[in-house]
Image (spheres, rainbow, N blue to C red):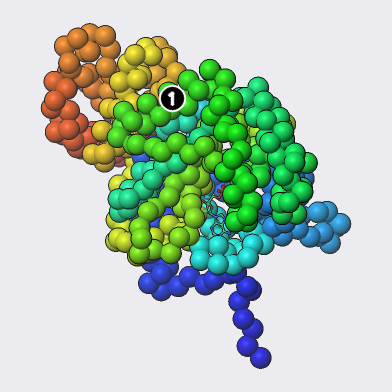
Amino acid sequence: MEINPVKGTHDIYLKEANEYQLIENTARAVAELFSYSEIRTPIIEHTPLFLRSVGESSDIVSKEMYTFDDKGGRSITLRPEMTAGVLRSVVSNKLYATPDLPLKLYYLGPCFRYERPQAGRYRQFHQFGVEVLGNPNYHLDSEVIALGHRILISCGLTNVEVKINSLGDETSRNNYREALKKYFADKVDKMCEDCKRRYEVNPLRILDCKVPEDIEIVKGAPKMSDFLTPEAKANLNDIIADLKSIGIEVSLDDNLVRGLDYYTGVVFEYHVKDENLVDVGAIGGGGHYANLLKELGGPDLEGVGMSIGVERLHYVVSQLTTPELMPKGPDVYLMGTSEYIIEQNVAFADMLRSSGFATMMNYEVKSLKSLFKIASRNNAKLAVIIGEDELTKNTLTVKNMLTGEQTSLKKENWENVLSDLLKEYVETYYSKVLAISKEEKEGN
Ligand code: HAM
């Protein structure tokens, strides 16, 4: 008797497997261009991890989890998403105890949700994503949004839309929740069973409802943007301005609340618009979470992350483009010793990455001495320094991290000179470092 695949699962093979590989390699290469490193966590976790993070008011936890008791009587769940497991691992392994915060991690793996299978919706699917943990800094939020955007662009997509919203800080959210309760109080009886439950546990979830009659009621609901505190508004505007400075235009979407409970602050989604494609929903999404690490037993560090659904990305890429591989490696460490220089460096890092230089930069002001330590710990090949002096003269100083040699160059010549300096670095590495180790060997 033939045994069929489980409903909502699919096999990937031959040509399609090659296409998946290309997409996954591109995503990995982009994450490494931004100096993220890989984390792999188990597919199975203790069930309470998801109750405490994704949240009991979410559809994922209330309806979609594959949960079972193992032979030892423990409640185990197949991960429905990656963020919770990654943060659990950061706490279990004390990965936050590093001199090089923020911690920047990327991952790829299968996830499981008991959903009704349809276009772009499976019961087993794959997520590629990143999580960043550190002190709050809006540049990190915009970096994560830009990283996901760059993955989609690097896969050859041109019509990517980034939708963005802010769930605000605790005060904004509490006020908004109260306003929603008031608005829905005399309407909830006519709404679906899910909305009745959402009204009790988390009225924000009602904005996510897909039932046509409920969508009509939701249209008249108060808007989150009217409840944001001035700080929360300023944070959202800073992120939008940062993205604009590297050519990413976003669209504000007041109804974007996302289906997971851990978000605070900015939330976003990537959509690909094309009238010839079946609408598979968001290709990816993510947001800021100020409290999740602490709630899972870690220190008081904030986080931001995003995940892309590999099946959905593969669908749009296979319909619209031919993806290409990206180069790998941390070629440049871009140093900023003041807030102003860091602002400038955001755009310059983007130009470097656009030209294929794997680039790392600092977002917190540090002394040159400590930046060199970081650059050397991370095996950067070239350190690029733009100080006050360089700013006025419109020059860059580049230091070969192997020989210590410094070169001063005009900013407009950076691309050719950096390519030459990188080649020089590689040649020196082979002739000096490898030759020395050969001599040492012979000497022994
Ligand atoms: P999410 O929006 O639930 O966010 O999922 C991210 C992406 O996974 C979706 O945009 C979609 O492409 C894909 N996806 C979700 N469910 C399915 C499904 N049933 N079939 C196929 N693809 C699916 C998260 O999971 C968050 N952990 C994202 C994040 C990371 N937030 C912060 N860090």
Q: Is residue 128 above or below residue 417?
A: below
Disc 1 is placed on an element classified as helix
Three-letter amino acid code at the position of disc 1:
Asn
Locate residue 408 relative to residue 121 in the image: left or right.
left
Q: Residue furthest right?
A: 73
Q: Is residue 436 above or below residue 19?
A: above
Locate residue 315 relative to residue 154 in the image: left or right.
right
Q: Quadrant of the N terminus?
A: bottom right
Residue 217 image position (x, y, % from top left): 63, 46
**Residue in the picture at 65% in, 39% down:** 204
Q: Few, some or many C-alpha atoms within 10 Å of disc 1 (few <14, some 14-19, many ≥20)?
A: some
Q: Is residue 240 above or below residue 121?
A: above
Residue position marked by numbered label 1 in the rendering: 237
Residue 416 image position (x, y, % from top left): 14, 33
**Residue in the picture at 61% in, 38% down:** 221
Q: Nearer the viewer, residue 351 or 444?
A: 351
**Residue in the picture at 13% in, 27% down:** 413
Residue 294 makes an appearance in the image: no
Q: Quadrant of the C terminus?
A: top left
Q: Quadrant of residue 43?
A: bottom right
Q: Nearer the viewer, residue 38 or 179?
A: 179
Residue 313 makes an appearance in the image: yes
